Amino acid sequence: MSEFISKMTSNQPVFDDNDPQDELITLNIGPTHPATHGVFQNVVQIDGERIVSGVSTIGYIHRAFEKIAEHRPFYQITPLTDRLNYCSAPINNMGWHMTVEKLLKIEIPKRVQYMRVIVMELARIADHIICNGILGVDTGAFSGFLYVMQEREFIYEIFEEICGARLTTNIGRIGGFERDFNAVAFEKISEFLKRYPPVLKEFEEMFVRNRIFIERTSGVAAVTPEQALDYGWSGPILRATGVDYDVRVQNSYCSYEEFDFEVPVGTTGDVYDRFMVRNEEMWQSLRIIEQALEKIEKEPKGVFHAEVPDFYLPPKEQVYTNMEALIYHFKIVMGEVDTPKAEVYHAVEGANGELGFYLIHDGGRSPYRLHFRRPSFVNYQMFAPMSAGMLLSDAILNMSSLNVIAGELDA
Amino acid sequence: MENSFLLDKLQGNFPSKIVEIPDAHDLMTILVDVDDIIDVLRFLKLDNELQFVHLTDITAVHFPHLEKEYAVVYHIHSLIHNIRIRVKVFLYGPNPEIPTATVVWKGANWMERETYDFFGINFIGHPDLRRILNVDDMDVFPMRKEYPLEDPNRVDKKDLYFGR
């Protein structure tokens, strides 16, 4: 001990070359670690600051949604989808409604489709705000996060105006929406289109050419397109590697083919590219919302659901006074409507990638089997293998830029 | 690319081993025998004309009323031709076994672990076949139909009480 202290005080290195240097330290990151931004665990072996190997453990908030869904009618499954990726719940809701509509072969009026597009793109912006903002926080730049967080709050106000809820929205019904967007909602959407671009511009200026940010993110966790496809990646992180796969374009749903927008792609697949792809996607989402508002103007007013009385609940006041409405209400709630025996797979472009619903229906009240293809679950499995050889602080950035949402990961 | 072209090509390369399931609601669905599944998947991925490079999903379904109780379902996507295909393999219970697809796609790893976790399907040759979402000491496979979600005596949700 005294030798150690004398080394310490005599300005010599504490460890010399004869000391064992190859001891590895086992470190638990998570399950509740501020840097994971969610409840999941990584046990990593580190050599100094470098990760040698890692194992991911997930499932801390597994809630058995697929099993629960086998016991619920379609309209009661929508709240379950809220809790997958809770940062962009409306996309999940819409994806689920569209899956059921595909099964039941329901045609949705154009105006409703545009309304859905608006809601989904707002949700995408809200989700990307979180991801890019947090990425900034993890590199040490806190203020950018606060700038854009205010705009996310505004998006939630729009959701509140549309459906009454903010985070777990349960927006929409099978066949359309539960009510029309009111005047305030339209007003707020237009206001958002005006007030968000300058904020996003300012956010961009803080990061895009910021030397510190570039040095911290550029070249970190670079992924080749081959690796990304091998691991089944999708969404912004796949596009950052240079693969232009976007479900909105490839398997267009909800009239996305009518909209004029670009699919941004990166080149190196590193954290910086992922940031840039998400950033550009926010601009493109704004463009889409703008076009959707114009298109809605040309559609007949007041249409907010398809005419499918077998599946769309009648207004409550009619149920008490109108015989037909009462019958439909009863049939829907009690599950007396005939539904086809079929299986469908429907995918939407979630904020993190391809969000798929695989639904097998046997004509009963509830699905025979429902499987969620969750992008976070598929994307995250590469995290532990790719962390080997990475600095611990880079691995944290990598995790941030994958935007793993625990709810979506565990279902 | 047409579905018929794809089916002809598959059946040409795997004579009398590929069966198309008719009346698929959305995607072309083919039925493959468990012994051929990896060859078929590898062919779909590596063939120059097809290039089904993106493994979208692996999951399973339990049909207790069928002789072959378990279906493993693969969703595969050819990004270049923008066509999806669903591949199904039916397996005998109660200890279904199927070779692992991790030799074709690394991304199959967690998807197969999830399928094992919930259905008890044993993926032969999988590098790390452990439970993934459920607790390690669980001794049932909860998505099998015989495991009830809640109190099995509860009758208010049973289909037979609704005239079905």
Image: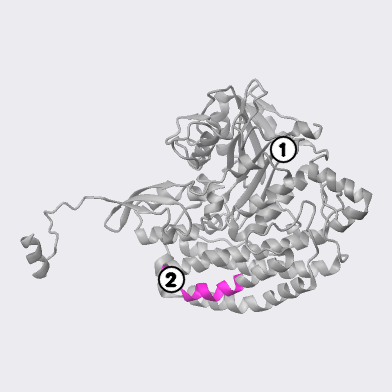
Q: What residue type is labelled 2?
A: Phe
**Residue A360 lies within the magenta run:** no
Judged by its main secondary structure, the magenta piece is helix
Q: Are marks 1 and 2 in contact (CB under 8 Å)?
A: no
In the rendered view, how is the structure colored? one colour
Residue B58 is situated, as x and y percent measured from the top left of the image, at 57, 38
Q: Disc 1 or disc 2, which is closer to the eye?
A: 1
Residue A242 is situated, as x and y percent measured from the top left of the image, at 54, 57
Q: Residue at x 73, y 45 (%)?
A: A74
Q: Is mark 1 on a helix, strand or loop?
A: loop
Q: How many labels does the image show?
A: 2
| A179, above or below A42, in the image | below
Q: Nearer the viewer, residue B65 or A385?
A: B65
**Relative side of A119 to A62, left or right:** right
Q: Which amino acid does label 1 sit on?
A: Lys
Q: Marks 1 and 2, Cα distance to the nearest angstrom?
A: 55 Å
Q: In which quarter of the image is residue A48?
A: bottom left
Can I make out residue A190 in this image? yes
Answer few, some or many: residues within 10 Å of disc 2's Cα (few below 14, many 20 plus, some between 14 and 19): some
Q: Which of A305 and A232 is in front in this view?
A: A305
Which residue is labeled 2 in the image? A213
Which residue is labeled 1 in the image? B157
| A350, above or below B25, in the image | below
**Relative side of B138 to A322, left or right:** left
Q: Which residue is drawn at 53% across and 59% down?
A: A240
The quadrant the N terminus of chain A occupies is bottom left
Can I make out residue A247 in this image? no
* Residue range (magenta): A139-152
Residue A237 is situated, as x and y percent measured from the top left of the image, at 53, 57
What mark, if any, has residue B11 been given in the picture? Answer: none
Answer few, some or many: residues within 10 Å of disc 1's Cα (few below 14, many 20 plus, some between 14 and 19): few
